[in-house]
Amino acid sequence: MGFTKSELVQFFDELTGLISEENQSEANLLIRGFVLDFEKSYKYEDAALQKNVPYVPPFYIPVMPQTFQEEIRLKLTEKLTELGEYSPENVEQAMHSKIYDLRELIDITEYAKWADEEIYKDFAKKLAASRW
């Protein structure tokens, strides 16, 4: 049986309620660390595929800063031309994907680093706002 992120957080909330008060703060820290690692390892892919998600995760190219998008578009155009697969449709299709899906075509290191930092910042804000 698998959990959605929401179900997992609810489970941990209920579990934390069962332990003694002196251990709750330590348990909350461990849970936050676990959820952070969980989100970083899955890169929010489940959220991108589910309904009622009010945001697009930052590892999708359309959410990245405009300068990154322009750089990525140029690199994709060059690479696809080099491979003989250039067409405006192919470039547009690639521009709507996840940066991690383009690692076979272009160097994504800088963009992936930005995405990971944004994911971490967003998650850290959510954790701070939801002090259990």
Image (cartoon, rainbow, N blue to C red):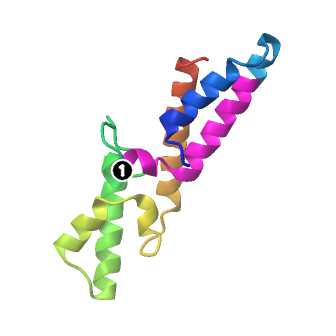
The residue furthest top is 21
Q: Most extreme residue toward the right, as rendered? A: 22
Q: Is residue 21 above or below residue 101?
A: above
Q: Position of residue 6 (x, y in %)?
A: 49, 34
96 displayed left or right of 131: left
Q: Quadrant of residue 83?
A: bottom left
Which residue is depicted at the point 34% across and 38% down? 53
35 horizontally vs 60: left or right: right
Question: Is residue 44 part of the magenta span, yes or no?
Answer: yes
Q: In percent of the image, x 53 and y 61: which residue is there? A: 109
Magenta part of the protein: which range?
27-49
| In this rendering, position of residue 32 left or right of residue 6 | right
User: Is label 1 in a helix, a strand or a loop?
Assistant: helix
Q: Is residue 81 magenta?
A: no
Reply above or below: 23 against 100: above
Q: What amino acid does circle 1 point to?
A: Leu
Measuring from the top left, give residue 68's x and y in whole percent.
37, 54
Residue labelled with disc 1? 49
x%, y% of residue 91? 25, 69
**Which image quarter: residue 71?**
bottom left
